[in-house]
């Protein structure tokens, strides 16, 4: 591998571009292919490239000149944490370590502060405006942790209108029931609302904010991988 | 532990480490899992980077074959040419270096020059 290829992958990742590295182990020939390009020099079909990027899994394909290994480097999954609350203070660093790109959203004064979330991407706006700008897609998870319908509901509505792979909302069964009713009145069907995980998190008997963060993160990873 | 994959970048931590070592002028090799069968612990695409003094970052198994991969990486750095490796229970090396879990993996180990 040429050092320039390796540095090219790192540069693409830092700038958020999706790329595929094609390697022919037979002779060591390599090519770094940008998403959206056509046929590569190693005989890799554009459709195959698109599929590898979509699935995000490496694979080996057979070509006239022998097997070629395709390794996609795609943007990490995103986690939008709505509510810069105590649970979020554990969830944000844990999810970051697990490879998620995390954004914390809370319009309230004193919540989404640099002191409470050192180094995190913070958005201090109301979700009805901010969520649209975040470009929610099929590799985005949204967790609503404020307990406050004024903040959680618009965030969940934006999430329900997107292809987000995970939606979760903090709150007891009673809170979930009231929320379902409100969102139902807003025009969402039972099928839509079933996308919301609530009570949030895997049932591991979590009690502390830190333990709840583990349960939530585990459930998000499950939605991504299973 | 220092993590090159800080929350400020999206770079794969192993590749970020590789870039850092290159920047320091160290000679390195990159090992990549190219194929797995059965219950191999690290999926295809997993990377491990090895420096010429044996320092390494990342993993290509649950820890069963890393030692052998480091050895090959050091040879590959000297030879200047990539090499494919196979590990598994059916491999003749199985009871010396193999996967206790019963999986099988193919790797490509290449110098980064």
Image: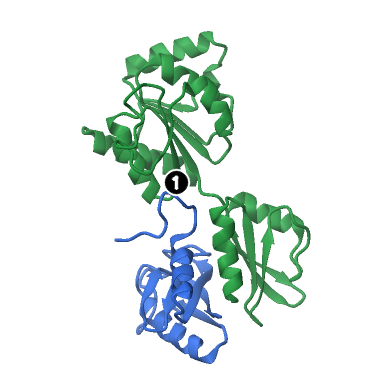
Query: Residue A56: x, y in percent?
Result: 58, 53
Query: Residue B3: x, y in percent?
Result: 36, 59
Quadrant of the drawing holding the C terminus of chain B: bottom right
Is residue B88 found left or right of B95 in the rendered image? right
Residue A213 visible within the image: no
Quadrant of the drawing holding the N terminus of chain B: bottom left
Q: Residue furthest top?
A: A185
In this picture the colour scheme is by chain
For the colour green, the matching chain is A
Is residue A166 found left or right of A89 in the rendered image? right
Query: Residue A207: x, y in percent?
Result: 21, 32
Please name the residue that numbered disc 1 is placed on: A100
Number of numbered discs present?
Answer: 1
Of the chain colours in the picture, the one used for chain B is blue
Is residue B80 found left or right of A95 in the rendered image? right
Q: Residue at x 78, y 58 (%)?
A: A38
The image quarter in which residue A201 lies:
top left
Q: Residue at x 57, y 30 (%)?
A: A133
Parent chain of label 1: A
- Against A52, residue A118 (above or below) is above
Query: Residue A156: x, y in percent?
Result: 48, 23
Task: For label 1, count other residues whose C-alpha is less than 10 Å away and answer few (under 14), some (14-19) or many (20+).
Answer: many
Q: Which residue is drawn at 50% across and 45% down?
A: A77
Of A17 and A165, the residue lying toward us: A17
Describe the element under mark 1 as helix, strand or loop: loop
The image quarter in which residue A173 lies:
top left
Q: Which residue lies furthest to the left in this view?
A: A208
Residue A201 visible within the image: yes
């Amino acid at each position: 591998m040429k050092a320039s290829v390796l540095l090219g992958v790192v540069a693409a990742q830092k700038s958020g571009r999706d790329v595929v590295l094609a390697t022919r182990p037979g002779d060591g020939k390599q090519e770094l292919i940008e998403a959206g390009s056509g046929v590569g020099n190693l005989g890799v079909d554009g459709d195959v490239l698109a599929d590898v990027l979509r699935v995000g899994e490496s694979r080996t394909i057979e070509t006239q000149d022998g097997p070629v290994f395709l390794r996609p480097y795609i943007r990490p999954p995103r986690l939008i944490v709505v509510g810069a609350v105590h649970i979020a203070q554990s969830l944000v660093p844990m999810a970051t370590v697990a490879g998620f790109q995390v954004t914390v959203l809370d319009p309230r004064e004193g919540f989404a502060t640099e002191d409470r979330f050192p180094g995190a991407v913070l958005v201090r706006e109301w979700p009805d405006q901010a969520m649209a700008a975040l470009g929610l897609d099929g590799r985005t998870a949204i967790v609503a942790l404020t307990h406050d319908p004024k903040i959680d509901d618009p965030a969940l509505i934006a999430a329900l209108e997107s292809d987000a792979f995970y939606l979760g909302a903090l709150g007891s069964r009673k809170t979930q029931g009231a929320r379902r009713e409100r969102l139902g009145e807003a025009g969402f069907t039972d099928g839509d609302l079933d996308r919301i995980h609530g009570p949030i998190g895997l049932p591991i008997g979590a009690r502390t904010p830190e333990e709840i963060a583990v349960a939530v993160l585990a459930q998000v990873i499950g939605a991504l991988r299973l | 532990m220092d993590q090159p994959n800080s929350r400020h970048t999206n770079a794969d931590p192993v590749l970020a480490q590789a870039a850092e070592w290159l920047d320091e002028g160290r000679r390195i090799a990159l090992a990549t899992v190219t194929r797995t069968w059965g219950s191999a612990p690290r999926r295809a695409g997993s990377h491990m980077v090895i420096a010429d003094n044996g320092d390494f970052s990342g993993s290509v198994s649950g820890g069963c074959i890393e030692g052998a991969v480091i050895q090959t990486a050091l040879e590959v750095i000297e030879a200047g040419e990539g090499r494919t490796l196979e590990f598994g229970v059916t491999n003749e090396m199985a009871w010396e270096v193999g996967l206790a879990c019963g999986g099988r993996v193919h790797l490509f180990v290449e110098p980064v020059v």
